[in-house]
Amino acid sequence: METQNKTVNIQTETKQQLIDLTSLLTDTIRTSGIRDGFAGIYSQHTTAALFVGECQSALVDDVLDFLKRVVDDGLNYKHNCPELSDCDRKNAASHLRGMLLNHSVLVPIMDGKPVLGQFQSVLLAELDGPRERSVHFQILGN
């Protein structure tokens, strides 16, 4: 059994956005030479998350709107208060949105390709951008 690791930095462009990492995952698996096993993808941030979903333009907008409705930016969060927190980004809502999602995804590998359904993509959810994000890939198998 072999293991390969790779960390990729991704520059995000807006406060909230979804970025399709599927082609990056596919390329990482291909260059690893591993034909069968698992690919673990991990976001190294508390305000950026990973999930498997459909990457269709209207649905991406719906997901981002949903997250804004579920966690309201306009509430008085303790994390945003200088007297109670050392965070100057005032990003409590971003942290709470991240808690609703995952920080890792595990995808099977078969015949050197990720096993995903027809409409499935691996998506990075930027919840507090724009900024540089680190995503770690660990490929394990034969």
Image: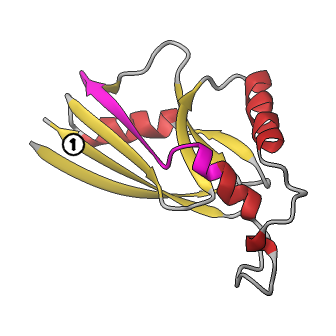
Q: Quadrant of residue 85?
A: bottom right
Residue 74 visible in image: yes
Q: Residue at x 87, y 59 (%)?
A: 75
Q: Quadrant of residue 82?
A: bottom right
Pointer 1 local density, CA inside 10 Å: few below 14, some 14–19, many at least 20? many
Q: Which residue range is magenta in the image?
A: 98-112
From this view, report whether residue 75 is shown above or below residue 20. Answer: below
Tell me the SS state at disc 1.
Answer: strand
Image position, residue 34 (x, y; %): 21, 36
From this view, report whether residue 80 is shown above or below residue 72. Answer: below
Image position, residue 74 (x, y; %): 90, 57
Q: Residue at x 29, y 55 (%)?
A: 5
Q: Residue at x 79, y 53 (%)?
A: 14
Q: Residue furthest top?
A: 118
From this view, report whether residue 78 is shown above or below residue 139. Answer: below
Left or right of 66, for residue 125:
left
- The amino acid at mark 1 is Leu
Image position, residue 141 (x, y; %): 17, 37
Q: For the N terminus, which image quadrant?
A: top left
State the residue position of label 1.
140
Q: Residue at x 79, y 73 (%)?
A: 80
Q: For the C terminus, which image quadrant?
A: top left
Left or right of 108, for residue 83:
right
